[in-house]
Image: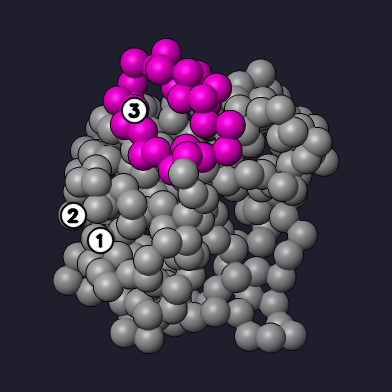
Amino acid sequence: MTARVPLASDTAMVLAAGIGKRMRPLTALRPKPMVKVAGKTLIDHALDRLKDAGIARAVVNVHYLADPLQAHLSHRKAPQIVISDERDALLETGGGMVRADRAGLLPETFFALNSDNIWLDGPCNVFDELSLAWDDGRMDALLLLVRHPDAYNYQGQGDFHLDPIGRISRRRHGRVAPYIYTGIQLLSRRLLRDAPEGSFSTNILWNRAMEEGRLFGAVHTGKWIEVGEPGHIAPAEALLSRI
């Protein structure tokens, strides 16, 4: 039996604070992470994968309809759930990570993932994939990417290009990029240094890392399913029923 890759971190931040506008009307009375696909809430799909990968701790940020989400999470035994409370202000992805970091909730290296992610692993799980590719001396962020044929429900033009050593650049205007961001990444706290105050997107931090040659990508060896709007649910369930 092949030995497992040592995980780069035992902690993941699960981004669950968003309002979920694209998922309306399903998010009128529930937070998007509690929308169900194949009988399971989106956030439980993600947390179950963390548990299966051996990640012990999940820092979950909450804002929109935070009370029912926090109550739902209180019943989980693993991974350990730590709440990063954003009830006072929606901070977006970057601001949410900065708040959790300033509260002492994040280690030097941590995984981060969107709470609405559903994926199928390839030969190894995604957290092993990222851990295997991680090089702390060269990287501030390592994004898990997927090729178009392996992205279900996705209708966009792609997000990124990779150079021969895996450094990321953005899709050029009017062109198609070969890689799509899955919403899963492995980060160093260095990425959060000198961050803006308040609400902002992680894109600001990625842009700086890109300019410094410290934003990298790893290509997922399995499948990824976009579940961003109500029309994505039935196709996702059909795919999951076949495995």
Residue 30: mark in rendering: none
Q: Earlier in the sequence, mark 3 or mark 2?
A: 3
Mark 2 and mark 1 residues within 8 Å of each other at the beta carbon: yes
Looking at the image, which residue is at 23% across and 74% down?
Answer: 138
Decide: few, some or many residues near mark 1? Use Cα within 10 Å; few <14, some 14-19, many ≥20: some
151 with respect to 66 (left or right) = right
Q: Earlier in the sequence, mark 1 or mark 3?
A: 3
Q: Is residue 116 above or below residue 109?
A: above
Looking at the image, which residue is at 55% across and 73% down?
Answer: 160
Residue linked to disc 2: 108
Q: Is residue 51 above or below residue 90?
A: above
SS assignment at label 1:
strand
Question: Where is the C terminus found, in terms of image quarters?
Answer: top right
Residue linked to disc 1: 188
Nearer the observer: mark 1 or 3; the answer is 3
Looking at the image, which residue is at 80% across and 36% down?
Answer: 25
Mark 3 and mark 2 residues within 8 Å of each other at the beta carbon: no
Decide: few, some or many residues near mark 3? Use Cα within 10 Å; few <14, some 14-19, many ≥20: many
Residue linked to disc 3: 81
Judging depth in this view, the residue of 171 and 188 nearest the camera is 188
Question: Where is the N terminus found, in terms of image quarters?
Answer: top left
8 with respect to 15 (left or right) = left
Q: Give, as a three-letter code, the residue at label 2.
A: Glu
Scheme of image coloration? one colour
Q: Give, as a three-letter code, the residue at label 1.
A: Ser
Q: In which image quadrant can residue 242 be found?
A: top right
Rounded to the nearest angstrom, the CA distance separating label 3 from label 2 is: 18 Å
Span of residues in magenta = 62-87
SS assignment at label 2:
loop
Q: Is residue 209 above or below residue 2?
A: below
